[in-house]
Amino acid sequence: MLKEDKTPTKNYWVFGLLIIVASLIVVFSFHHNPAADAERYFLRLGIKSLITSIGFISAGVLLLRSVVLGHGLGHRMLYGSLILFGSMQGYYFLVVLINSMEGQLSFPGFFGVADLILMLCIGLSMVIGLLEDERSKLKKANSELDNFLYRTSHDLRSPIASVLGLTNLAKLETHELKGLKYIAMIEDRVKKLDAVISDILDLSRSTKSLLKIEKINFNTLVEDIFSDVKFDKNSEPISFRYSPDPANLFFADYSQMKIILNNLIYNGVKYHRQQAYPFILVEFIKQKDYVTISVTDNGEGIAEEHQMKIFEMFFRASTNSDGTGLGLYMVKEVLDKVNGTISLKSVLGTGSTFTITLDQSKFND
């Protein structure tokens, strides 16, 4: 508020110096006068209470009217506490004034406790207000970062699409084997970059989107995902297994659940082993207030030392992996959003089982 005030800073120093000089003059004027007990009493307590009252009430009102400072719970609590404390000090001044004029008015017994409570409220509200300010700043910074990521990722996809188009043209017009090899390498790297950007966009959309909880037919959800996955070039030898049941209904956000299962099933496709009968099995179990969804594959599996880190951002269990390291991180983030958990059982060279648990206790059929 002082920064906004146009009053020169030196004026505050002059005003403070005048108060000190006036105070010293008053003190020495009545210090050796035995007959001035009433005056000393009034100056010692009355003026102090009056100045404190004016100061706290003015501060509370000015802060309340300020458009720069926040008006959250902590701020409103602070402004109200300042005004109440100033009002009590004003009552103290009234008591001192009446008593110094030979009246009889005593302080209520609860006023000391009230002072203590109000001072505690002032201190607590300052802490709450600071936390609210920090939360507001963090929220703004996160929002700006999300917007930056979204816009940057979106803008990058256009030139990537152009590069991929040019590589296709180059393949059609190039007949030299070595040249085709380099073009294929460029195309592969560009596609990987596009996959990373696509995952970042999906993550940004997922974190910003509001949940839409609805009753979901799990059979329809799985059929939808299987239809998409079967177009992948690596999925041809894989057997997709799921036993539909009309009772497989649960409550969640359809788009978020599709992101989760898409990532888990696509991982099973991406990391399947060259073997006789590769498969991906999806199971749905509903027991009382919980739904359990499991995705099992007999693919490469994950080494035990990596299993605690697979849900971290950009973590890849193998240097040979062509994944972005964002898929399982996104699964964990989305599950946190829908109040779900995920666990993993995996044996390297045998396969993996991801198990999702969703709390349905808040919903009724």
Image (cartoon, rainbow, N blue to C red):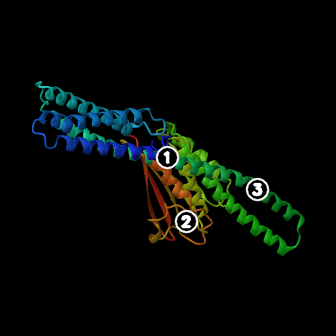
Type of residue at label 2? Gly
Q: Earlier in the sequence, mark 1 or mark 2?
A: 1
Farthest top residue in view: 103
Label 2: which secondary element: loop
**Gap in angstroms between the C-alphas marked 3 and 2:** 35 Å
Which disc is residue 159 wearing?
3
User: Residue visible at 49% across and 38% down?
Assistant: 246
Q: Is residue 87 above or below residue 328?
A: above
Kindly report which numbered mark, 3 or 1, lies closer to the viewer in this rendering.
Answer: 1
Q: As rendered, which of 83 and 346 lies closer to the eye?
A: 83
Which disc is residue 139 wearing?
1
Which disc is residue 209 wearing?
none
Contact check, label 3 and label 2, Cβ < 8 Å: no
Q: In this view, does 283 lie above or below 84?
A: below
Image coordinates for residue 81, horizontal then vertical, percent: 30, 35
Image coordinates for residue 222, horizontal then vertical, percent: 56, 46
Q: Residues within 10 Å of mark 2 (few under 14, many from 20)?
A: many
Judge left or right: residue 24 versus residue 166. Answer: left
